Amino acid sequence: MVQRLKEVDVVIVGVGMVGSIVAKELAAAGYKVVGLERGDARFTVPEFQSPAVHDELRFDIRKALMQDNTREPVTFRNARSETALPVRRWESFLPGTGLGGSMVHWNGQTYRFQANDFELATRTRERYGKNFLDKDVTIQDWGVTYAELEPYYDRFEYLLGTSGKAGNIKGEIQPGGDPHESPRSREYPTPPQKEHFQGALFRKAATSLGYHPFPQPSSNLSQPYTNPEGVKLNACVFCGFCERFGCEHYAKSVPQTVILPVLLANSNFELRTGCQVQRINLDSTKKKATGVTYIDTAGREFEQPASLVITSSFALNNVRMLLLSGIGKPYDPETGTGVVGRNYAYQTVSSVASFFDEDVFINPFMASGASGTLINDFAGDNFDHSGLGFIGGAFIGAVNTNGRPIQYHPVPPGTPGWGKGWKQAVVKHYNHSVMFSLHGSSVSTRQNYLDLDPTYRDAWGQPLLRMTFDFPQNDLKMAAYVTAKGVEIGKAMGAKQVAGAPRTAPYTTTVYQTTHNTGGTVIGNDPRTSVVNRYLQSWDVPNVFVIGASAYPQNASWNPTGTLGALTYWAIDALKNRYLKNPGRLVSA
Amino acid sequence: MDKFSRRRFVATIGVATVAPAAALLEMAPAEAASPQQMTQPVSPAEPAKPVYLFFNLAEAAFIESACERLIPADESGPGALGAGVPNYLDKQLGGAWGSGERLYRSGPWQSGSPSQGYQLPFTPAELFHAALRAINRKFETQGTAFDALSAEAQDTYLKTLEAGGVNLDGVPSAVFFDMLLRMSVEGFFSDPVYGGNRDMVAWRMIGFPGAYADYYEAIDRHGEKFVREPMSIAEDARRHLHVDPNIPASL
Amino acid sequence: MGCLLALGASLIIADAAPPAAKSQSAKRPGPAAAAVCQGCHGANGEGAPAAKIPRLAGQSADYLDKQLRDYATGARTNEIMQNFAKPLNEADRGAVAAFFASRTAPSIAPNPRATDFQMARGHQLAHQGSEPERVQACDNCHGPDGSGVPHSAPYLAGQSADYLAAELQSWREGERKNDAGKLMYSVAQRLNDADVSAVSAYFASLGAP
């Protein structure tokens, strides 16, 4: 028996960072907004307080803050020739849940993409010719440029209070920052976090090789900060329990510490937690959403009518929501037609381990999630790819975030997996190793995509999302190339032994890499190759906006979150100043 | 402020082991052990063996010997037995984790590729019982037991399991071995609240300071050893550890 | 005492002489440089809570050393303490810090005792913090029940309530500024007078570690 509720102006599916920002802006503009979040409410006090939160087994190994995989996993296969099977335990990627979403337990690494990334297809063709790419690669332009998004990047960074050093202010290269970055209008809101010892070693080595190291932009703040919303954050103390954990100190920029106090105080907004949205409902024309249907924790079904529906859940869940709701044509890899689920991409992450003598104390446990030092000399299109046979690249950095010993106990290649030899190696190397991350881009291809699984269902009886993905040749070549560069830096640090581990195929769901799942509801100017227009508005159902990294046509060399924040503010501008003044219509480009 | 050379600092580590909680940090004069810092953490008085609630006698005998081969005692410190790893395993397998916490348990079950990960219907508890039953039965029919073998022979047997190809009452041996090794590492390095890493021996062995973690000032001391007694989420103001293995894998 | 000093001396830079042993009152152990401290802080650093003179016994040596250094340079302002800290050379400072760090002394029961409200609210702030004020738990940095975390934060348990309250007010007003990362300033900003007195009274009521 479905209970039909009173209609509101806006219903938001997923109250993570995106949902919180959208809700705050629309509620402040006078609209009645309901935010539906499937998980629980949680706050810095009491849920993120230490020492209880500093429990590696619970939060890191057992994924206590993550999406409930016992009721709602995804299915996975490397290729269409296989049968997709459930990801029965999260490992490779870790979707979040609950109020604040995955930005509660993110690492705070806050990057911008570069101008080139937003016009990747055009610029690749211009620079390298139209036959440079492998035939199966389906990268495309975004339909919105870096220059258009720059003010929104700025707004998001100032909301968070991101700590960093600008490298390019309005075209002028700034010492100490990243000379490769696209121009920003002003400095970061707070200065960079302190550099740890491994960052200093990396900096020295990278500089000696002619590269341009700079401090990782960090939303674990370097000093107390009051953001434009009037919310205060504290300085981070480098506790080394960042990713997968809540922050006890109000020092990590998460929805609870940057915007929720303002949102939750606005009576135009109503938060409902424990609400599992089943689908977006459409009218008989299938071109207009009438609201959503959800089931609460007691199993009761509700219909929430609304004039405007915003789906701002995790990227994978946005795609699934459209598929379950029949919005947009599902992608068919066989024919190459359809768009929903198309251009799924990920992140191609490699690593380099450098081992030092036992009188060099690294203290890996002293770190924030983003207190590293890195270079962009081999990221994006910052280097000439002629003759290399791939596009894209990786940032390379001493960006290790922790020394939590269940997972972090580096040993050199050839060390036995257990026994006396293993134990001795662990003791010998634990505090005397530096791990680099090589955080690489991910091109989209015809054969990597998302759809609904034909067999497996969630606890509510709905088909699970099916992921078909393997690393394209392009990205494997890129990984090998950048890893070799990383090994050189390791050697230049004076390490006794350096071991590179480039990413190789096949992609496996059994080893953690990142939760940077992108694509599936791609942004663009052409409805034949995109699901949403450049304002993140559904081409098919104009009163539905899909805001998430599901919009990315391919993934760049950097973490997606900063760009998502910019897109969110960009979409809000279009919503407030254009869509809502003429609702029900496509906002023209 | 006078700087300590690294070599001098390394030389002082020997002093640290004499007064283990004497916190030494460069640049400061000797941190004489304060009464608060003098005491090692105190576990509740424990019998020589844990009270096994999940493992029966034969299972416990295998687990104790096998875990000690995986993480043996040596010059650097205790191994799995001394750290209470079998106790950790017993409490986890006998609790929510063992019965399938955080495991998607719907069928149909099909074997997949390595990229697709674990696809068996067994909960960890079921998996361990099945595998241990098969292992102990095999040794029984040979008139011996795993814990009666020499260390070398035990290692050889474990490597056989690790290599796969042995069916342990439906559990592929490589899957069992992988789970045993992972859980042993967890039991060794997790917070002692879970019943392993007894008295934080493993943390002390590698120099991991534990759950209280404010390094705002210490992070500036590049290259210098950080010496502090490790601290558990389970310790009270008197440094007594209150073990509680039943913490859920959810918030 | 001698062996502790020897320990201390061996870890100080090689050319600093250990403090000269002077004839001392039979009642007062410790290096000569500590004698003047003991006059106010007590023979074993037990403090004088009612006079806001903090307990030093068993306090973290590097915390004590830093405070003395900060008093000497003016990084922490207090006319009385400045005058005592300035004349200390580095060796003396280290010896004084090490001495008091090594002492034990019975806790002095607070007077007046904490009220029920102070105990309840203080306990909450100490262990859990408070979301409406967006203040985190003191124990995060100060250890279980404020028993201190070496190289991070001093113990609070058993400290003088009036002293703790005065310091929190000082942090709050921006008068005391020698905290790392402005951490104490950030916390104190979010505590009103009732919370300041609650958390101070609560910690004072606990036995010192």
Image (cartoon, rainbow, N blue to C red):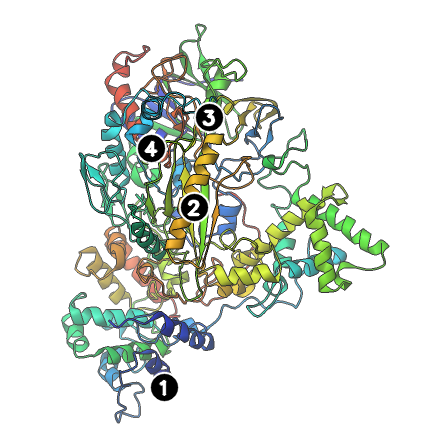
Q: Which mark is residue A245?
A: 2
Identify the mark at residue A344; answer none if there is no mark: 3
- Label 4: which secondary element: loop
Instruction: Tell which subunit mark 3 falls on.
Output: A
On the same chain, marks 3 and 2? The answer is yes
Amino acid type, residue under disc 1 in the picture? Met
Q: Is residue A7 visible?
A: yes
Please say if the residues under marks 1 and 3 sit with CB atoms less than 8 Å apart: no
Residue where numbered disc 4 is placed: A381
The location of residue C9, given as percent across then percent down, is 33, 82
Q: Disc 1 versus disc 4: distance between alpha carbons?
A: 66 Å
Q: Tell me the distance, in whole angstroms, between the alpha carbons under discs 4 and 2.
A: 34 Å
Distance in Å between CA atoms under marks 1 and 3: 70 Å
Chain identifier of the residue bearing label 1 in the image: C
Tell me the mark number nearer the camera, choosing from 1 and 4: 4
Amino acid type at circle 3 is Tyr
Is the residue under label 2 in contact with that under label 1 (CB below 8 Å)?
A: no
Q: Nearer the viewer, mark 1 or mark 3?
A: 3
Q: Amino acid at mark 2?
A: Phe
Question: Which of the chains bears the disc numbered 4?
Answer: A
The answer to whether tags 1 and 3 share a subunit is: no
Marks 4/2 same chain: yes
Q: How many residues crowd around disc 1 within 10 Å: few (fewer than 14), some, or many (20 or more)? A: few
Q: Position of residue B146 (x, y in %)?
A: 76, 59
Q: Reading the chain from its start, which is encountered first: label 3 or label 2?
A: 2
Residue designated by label 1: C1
**The C terminus of chain A, quarter of image:** top left
- Residue B90 horizontal side relative to residue A550, left or right: right
